[in-house]
């Protein structure tokens, strides 16, 4: 009799334990689902999520220009002894505090006919506003640079305006800025900050005026400034600025002829600066 009473008691105890374990298991599964939902909240598309920029690092600027390009842009270097020539081609890195955010390099050489200077600057824009993407912030930074260049108010890449007959008949054969019609860019400071006071009376000859470049990266513009270096020599600086995603690249290429009577060729400098800009844009895409 006692043995028969003991067995049902054990069975009841085992049943109670089984029910308790089942209940605990059910709670664990529920908690796991709630945790998965919590982990997915940072990626919840219903909230304002700013996209990060395409680029997280920058190119090494002093190595980003090919040797053949440097030989073309710095012709005076070819006449130097080998050690000096190699030093010129290596360039001088710009001192920055964070090379993943800002980096640059410069080159300079003097030749018997002219001296040439080249600088490049890479800026990786990061937005600190969680509601603004890096690209949107970079677009604003680029827009400020373009506005500061004070480009002519004309549709890109057309010339600023058609000179008046009086301007065409000027002794120099170039528009003097007195033409009537649409407004043209006066001889004021451009991207380089130097006033254009050269023999042409304008930053660049007609048809080569500072302008927006429609076929380079996400957005780009070109500036061309002719200025006096000292009391006599004339120095021309061509600047090309372009944006690719959240990176802004600035190229400045300048020439100063050895003879004070010579004016640097705007067309040649612009073509070389734009060629370098296209190469750098392709390098960022690789």
Image (cartoon, grey):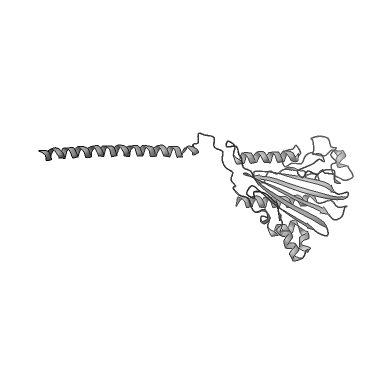
User: Quarter of the image holding residue 222?
Assistant: top right
Q: How many labels does the image show?
A: 0
User: Quarter of the image holding residue 75?
Assistant: bottom right
Q: Which of 202 and 86 is in front in this view?
A: 86
Q: In this rendering, would 89 be left or right of 176?
A: left
Residue positioned most to the left? 1
In what quadrant of the picture does the N terminus appear? Answer: top left
Counting from the top left corner in percent of width and height, residue 157 is at 72, 42
Q: Which of 102 and 15 is in front in this view?
A: 15
The residue at 41%/37% (across/down) is 34
Residue positioned most to the bottom? 82
**Is 120 situated above or below 189?**
below
Q: In this rendering, would 40 be left or right of 66?
A: left
Counting from the top left corner in percent of width and height, residue 216 is at 67, 46
Counting from the top left corner in percent of width and height, residue 45 is at 50, 36
The residue at 82%/56% (across/down) is 114
Q: In this rendering, would 6 be left or right of 155?
A: left
Residue positioned most to the front? 2
Q: In this rendering, would 48 be left or right of 195?
A: left
Counting from the top left corner in percent of width and height, residue 41 is at 47, 37
User: Quarter of the image holding residue 170?
Assistant: top right
């Amino acid at each position: 009799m006692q043995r028969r009473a003991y067995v049902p008691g054990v069975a009841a105890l085992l049943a109670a334990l089984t029910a308790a374990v089942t209940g605990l298991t059910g709670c664990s599964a529920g908690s796991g689902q709630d945790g998965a939902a919590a982990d997915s909240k940072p990626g919840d598309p219903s909230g304002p999520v700013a996209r990060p920029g395409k680029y997280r690092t920058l190119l090494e600027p002093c190595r980003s220009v090919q040797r053949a390009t440097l030989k073309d842009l710095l012709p005076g270097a070819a006449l130097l002894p080998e050690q000096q020539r190699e030093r010129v081609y290596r360039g001088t890195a710009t001192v920055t505090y964070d090379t993943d955010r800002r980096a640059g390099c410069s080159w300079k050489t003097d030749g018997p006919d002219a001296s040439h200077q080249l600088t490049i600057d890479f800026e990786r824009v990061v937005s600190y506003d969680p509601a603004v993407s890096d690209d949107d912030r970079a677009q604003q930074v680029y827009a400020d640079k373009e506005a500061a260049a004070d480009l002519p108010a004309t549709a890109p890449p057309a010339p600023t305006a058609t000179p008046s007959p009086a301007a065409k008949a000027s002794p120099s054969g170039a528009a003097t800025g007195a033409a009537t019609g649409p407004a043209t860019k006066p001889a004021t400071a451009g991207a380089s900050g130097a006033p254009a006071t050269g023999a042409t009376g304008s930053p660049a000859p007609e048809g080569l005026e500072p302008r927006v470049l429609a076929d380079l990266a996400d957005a780009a513009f070109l500036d061309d400034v002719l200025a006096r270096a000292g009391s006599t020599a004339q120095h021309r600086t061509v600047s090309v600025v372009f944006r690719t995603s959240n990176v802004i690249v600035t190229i400045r290429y300048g020439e100063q002829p050895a003879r004070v009577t010579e004016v640097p060729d705007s067309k040649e400098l612009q073509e070389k600066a734009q060629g370098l800009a296209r190469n750098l844009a392709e390098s960022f895409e690789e």
